[in-house]
Image (tube, rainbow, N blue to C red):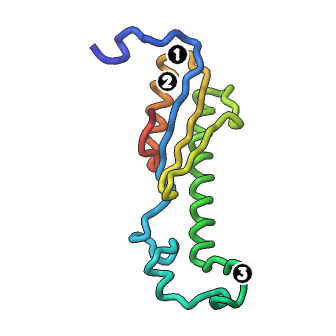
């Protein structure tokens, strides 16, 4: 007996939250010039005023700015690919209800979409397509 042969424990239609976790960041070992790690900063000269010259903070090194821009681009691409899939299976899903949370080290992005689930087949197909995405680590 397969899982699709078993009766569903969910009564449809219902609001059903789906959490999608994806990798959006990279480790500094893979791209040392793109992410500002302690080794990169130690080798570069200071960008701002010397101690005692000013109370203002120095501007971040160009590598930090580039890393932040790359991270934001990856976040947006991941969110858009997930939204496209979710809306294909649940056309009434409102993107304004998407909840996003980035991990402490900016490596993972967690998205929660609460859809109106209408059938087990709908959920099975949605889960399968999300799991087939290369940047998706986990779907709950």
Q: Residues within 10 Å of mark 2 (few under 14, many from 20)?
A: some
Of circles 1 and 3, the one toward us is 3
Q: CA distance from mark 2 to mark 3?
A: 55 Å
Camera-nearest residue between 54 and 134: 54
Give the secondary structure at mark 1.
Answer: loop
**Coordinates of residue 79 in the picture (x, y in percent):** 60, 46
**Coordinates of residue 73 in the picture (x, y in percent):** 61, 59
User: Pointer 3: what residue?
Assistant: 55
Which comes before the other along the chain, label 1 or label 3?
A: 3
User: Pointer 2: what residue?
Assistant: 123
Give the secondary structure at mark 2.
Answer: helix
**Residue found 44% across the figure and 49% down from its top:** 134
Of circles 2 and 3, the one toward us is 3
Q: CA distance from mark 1 to mark 3?
A: 60 Å
Camera-nearest residue between 62 and 122: 62
The quarter in which the C terminus is drawn is top left
Give the secondary structure at mark 3.
Answer: loop
**Coordinates of residue 44 in the picture (x, y in percent):** 52, 88
The answer to whether marks 1 and 2 mark residues whose Cβ atoms lie closer than 8 Å is yes
**Residue found 70% across the figure and 90% down from its top:** 53
1 relative position to 88: left or right: left
**Residue found 45% across the figure and 36% down from its top:** 139
Q: CA distance from mark 1 to mark 2?
A: 7 Å
User: Pointer 1: what residue?
Assistant: 119
């Amino acid at each position: 007996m397969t899982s699709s042969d078993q009766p569903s424990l969910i009564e449809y239609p219902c609001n059903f939250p789906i959490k999608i976790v994806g990798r959006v960041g990279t480790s500094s070992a893979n791209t040392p010039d793109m992410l500002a790690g302690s080794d990169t900063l130690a080798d570069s000269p200071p960008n701002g005023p010397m101690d005692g010259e000013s109370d203002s903070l120095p501007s971040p090194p160009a590598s930090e700015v580039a890393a932040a821009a790359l991270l934001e681009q990856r976040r947006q691409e991941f969110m858009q690919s997930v939204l496209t899939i979710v809306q294909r299976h649940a056309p009434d899903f409102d993107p304004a209800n998407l909840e996003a949370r980035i991990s402490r080290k900016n490596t993972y992005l967690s998205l929660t979409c609460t859809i109106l689930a209408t059938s087990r087949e709908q959920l099975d197909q949605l889960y399968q397509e999300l799991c087939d995405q290369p940047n998706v680590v986990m779907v709950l």
